[in-house]
Image (spheres, grey):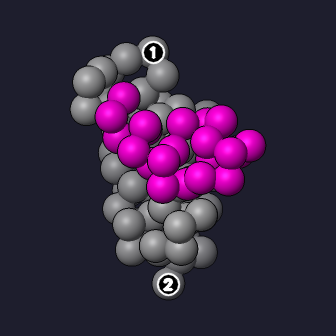
Amino acid sequence: GQLQLDQGGNPGRALELFRRYLAATAQGPLAQEAAWGVARAQRALGDSAAERIALEAFLRDFGASGKAPSVAERLAELP
């Protein structure tokens, strides 16, 4: 998913891959990265409502993460 988002310029495909990973292994070793990827892909797709939902889910599931302050900051920026 990261490659599709960062280098492939295909956020829709990235979103699909991140969601597929989370559905298969919600507690897997890359779950935090996949959850963050969902939010980033939604942002790249221009869907702020879906991005908000993804960011809220990230904070719920990974609130102790080092990424949590950045996620909260981005959430506060959304309309």
> Quarter of the image holding residue 6?
top right
Q: Is tag 1's residue or tag 2's residue first in the polypeptide sequence?
A: 1
The one nearer the camera, 64 or 9, is 9
Q: What kind of secondary structure does the magenta stretch mostly adopt?
A: helix
**Left or right, residue 49 beside residue 12:** left
> Quarter of the image holding residue 40?
bottom right
- Residue 29 numbered mark, or none: 1
Q: Give neighbour class at mark 1: few <14, some 14-19, many 20+ (Cα, 10 Å).
A: few
Residue ID at (53%, 67%): 45
**Left or right, residue 23 beside residue 59:** left
Q: What residue did someone put label 2 on?
A: 79
Question: Is residue 38 visible in this depiction of the protein?
Answer: no
Q: Which residues are magenta?
A: 1-21
- Residue 65 numbered mark, or none: none
Q: Secondary structure at mark 1?
A: loop
Alpha carbon distance from label 1 to label 2: 32 Å
Whether residue 41 is in magenta: the answer is: no
Q: Residue lying furthest top in this view? A: 29
Percent position (x, y) of residue 26? 29, 27
Q: Secondary structure at mark 2?
A: loop
Question: Residue 35, relative to residue 70: is it above or below?
Answer: above
Whether residue 9 is in magenta: the answer is: yes
